[in-house]
Amino acid sequence: MLPFPPKTLALDYGTRRIGVAVSTGTLAEPLEVVSNRPEPEAFANVVSLGALRRIKTLCQDHQVAQILIGLSEGKMAELTQKFAQFVKTECQLPIIFWDETLSSVTVVSRLKAAKIDRRSQPKIDHFAAATILEDWLENQ
């Protein structure tokens, strides 16, 4: 029997960077920001092979049971769904989508509240992934 909630890797997809977070029980831990420079002819110009391999390694290293992917709206939602298909094929794990609306805004707000200069923390994608994961965990 799997623990509840199952160990989950969260991804905040972007065409240049992918934020990654992992759950530990009901807590979300920001892990890293994966560079995503899609090759024009590969993977529908959605994700780089290097990013896919890194995500698969993180899934294995953290022994996750599922992947949570933040889903926005419009064109980014379409790209995110294409990205999710490549991740699912590569990692062979269930994919869950969760609304990521305003996750980056929430992170910037938290940085300001903590009096952390945004310029000193230019890559916030892993924090956004953790915010998406926190929201999902709270709703389970």
Image: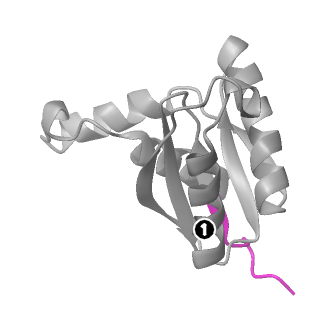
Q: Mark 1 Cα within 10 Å, few/some/many (few <14, many 20+)? A: few
Q: Which residue is denoted by mark 1 in the rendering?
A: 57
Find out whether residue 3 is within the magenta segment.
yes
Residue positioned 60% across, 68% down in the render: 57
Which image quadrant for residue 29?
Answer: bottom left
Residue positioned 65% across, 68% down in the render: 59
In this view, the residue farthest toward the front is: 41
Q: Is residue 35 above or below residue 65?
A: above
* Left or right, residue 67 beside residue 49: right
Residue 2 position in % (x across, y down) = 81, 82
Q: Amino acid at mark 1?
A: Thr
In this view, the residue farthest toward the bottom is: 1
For the C terminus, the image quarter is bottom right
Front-most of residues 128 and 46? 46
Residue 73 position in % (x across, y down) = 69, 18
Give the prevailing secondary structure in the magenta stretch. Answer: loop
Q: Is residue 67 visible?
A: yes
Residue positioned 59% across, 31% down in the render: 38
* Left or right, residue 73 beside residue 39: right
Label 1 residue SS: helix
Front-most of residues 43 and 19? 43
Residue positioned 15% across, 31% down in the render: 119
Find out whether residue 140 is within the magenta segment.
no
Q: Look at the image and give the residue range highlighted in magenta.
A: 1-9
Residue 52 position in % (x across, y down) = 64, 50
Residue 46 position in % (x across, y down) = 67, 29
Which image quadrant for residue 43?
Answer: top right
For the N terminus, the image quarter is bottom right
Front-most of residues 67 and 139? 67
* Left or right, residue 107 beside residue 18: left
